[in-house]
Amino acid sequence: MSYLYAGQQLAQGESFAFCHPYNNSIGPYFTLAGFNVRDQGNAACLYLNYPPGFPLILAASQILVGSRDAALYIPALFGVFGLMATFALGAVLFDPWVGALGALILAFTPTFLTFSTSPWSDVPGAVLLTGGIAAFLWGNQQKRKLWQIVGGGIGGGMIGWSIFIRYASVIVLLPLVVYVWLTRRNRAIGNRSIQVFSTCIASAILGVLIFNRVYYGGYLTTPYSPQHGWYSWPAFSLRYVFGESPVGGQSLLATMRTVWKNFAWLLLLTGWGVVRMRTLQRILVLGSVLLFAGFYVGYAFPPQGINARFLLPAFPFISLATGYGLWNAAPKQWRWWWRGFGTMVMGLLLLMPLSDHLRDLAGRNTSTASYVSDVVRLVEGSESNAVFLAYNANDAIAYYGQRTTLFYRRIPSPDPETSGYQVETFEDRLVAAVDTLLENGVPVYYVQDSDPPSWGILAILKHHFSPHPLGTAPPVYRIQRLSGDR
């Protein structure tokens, strides 16, 4: 929802910020979950926690189509582009048949299907990365300088935009640079494709640094920096690889489970494909997979479930390696027989679980629609100026219910000394905020959408105020002052 709101703001000519006067007069708690970066010059506004590349795409879609609903179709559109980009990369790096097989395999992976139908930035970022590599390699192979410039410009522009979507995309440059340098060697510097590509990438990185300085306060400061609300524990640590992270789960095992869930026994062909590749192809394919997977095995949020999206940039490379393994699995005299038979068998293996995947997606969509409907119903009888306190439903109430929300889980400040939170300040700040609202005649409601209530908030509200249950599900309380208070 934060991405959608940011895109709408940009489409209307506004900054990607969530602004409310209460953030200035009461505290920086009246916001969506994805807006936490404070503007020192305007305390009423909080900026998006994420890089700007994806909201810009959402805004462009709304401006071009003339409807804000256009943003909802962007992930699916990029999902189609992702298959085309995978085919193109396979065709440039290997041959068109391998590219077609890679695209086919990618199309049936559950994680790619899930996030190609969900408004997250990860599929667009991965698609631009894959397409950018394909365009650059194509330009690098051309003899005419015009096509070198075109390929380098398109490739550099797409990868540069991918970096603006997810800063982690920059790590793909390492295996790509090694591949191109070993391919071109002494001819690399004079190649126009490489020159234009390098200029685009350098401009993108410079743009990111300037953007960070303007919006986040420092060239190397990002929205994930501690001063902008990152958790009290480190984002990356070696102990997360095999040990439990604060979020739960072990990142290395989570990575392995996610890859297995998407490719399963096809990984045998993946391994064979990597073995059969030429050395330079192996450097690019295997290097890209290992770098992306390795980057997240030390991340506090294990790449599984909703966070399986972190591994999406590696999926086209795994799919192409699998396709290459199938295409080159049999001895030469049996190769075409095996290619036809193997492709049919692989197609059946991919089709068998497809109905389950589609049923899960349909269930997700139905559940989401029902949830939104329930949230709108929950708040529709409230006053238009009401303020709601909710933990999980905060964004849905603000975005779909069109009510102001006090995002109370933002109240405790991270404590770097204890790797925890300064919980001792939570009660005083919460009570002061609610008291100020009630003093000004603003209706306040609490939604008990977690069990037990997070941060002990219900007990705090009962101690300082008079919560009256409204008989709803989930329970909603109208918060009023104690009878003895003026």
Image (cartoon, rainbow, N blue to C red):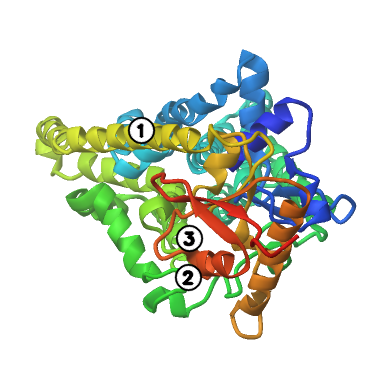
Q: Which residue is mark 1?
A: 365
What residue is shown at x 61% (from left), y 85% (from top)? Answer: 418
Which of discs 2 and 1 lies nearer the camera? The answer is: 1
Give the left or right position of residue 187, taking residue 248 as reference: right
* Mark 3 touches mark 2? (CB < 8 Å): no
Residue 184 location, x and y as percent? Answer: 58, 47
Give the left or right position of residue 244, taking residue 130 as reference: left
Q: Give the camera-side residue of 380 and 280.
A: 380
* Mark 2 touches mark 1? (CB < 8 Å): no
- Tell me the element at label 1: helix
Residue 34 location, x and y as percent? Answer: 62, 49
Q: Which residue is mark 2?
A: 298
Which kind of residue does numbered mark 3 sit on? Leu
Q: CA distance from mark 3 to mark 2?
A: 12 Å
Q: CA distance from mark 1 to mark 3?
A: 33 Å
Give the left or right position of residue 254, taking residue 168 as reference: left
What residue is shown at x 66% (from left), y 65% (from top)? Answer: 411
Which kind of residue does numbered mark 1 sit on? Asn
> Which numbered dot is residue 291?
3
Q: Badge 2: few (under 14), some or many (20 or more) residues near its Cα, within 10 Å?
A: many
Q: Quadrant of the C terminus?
A: bottom right
Residue 368's image quarter? top left
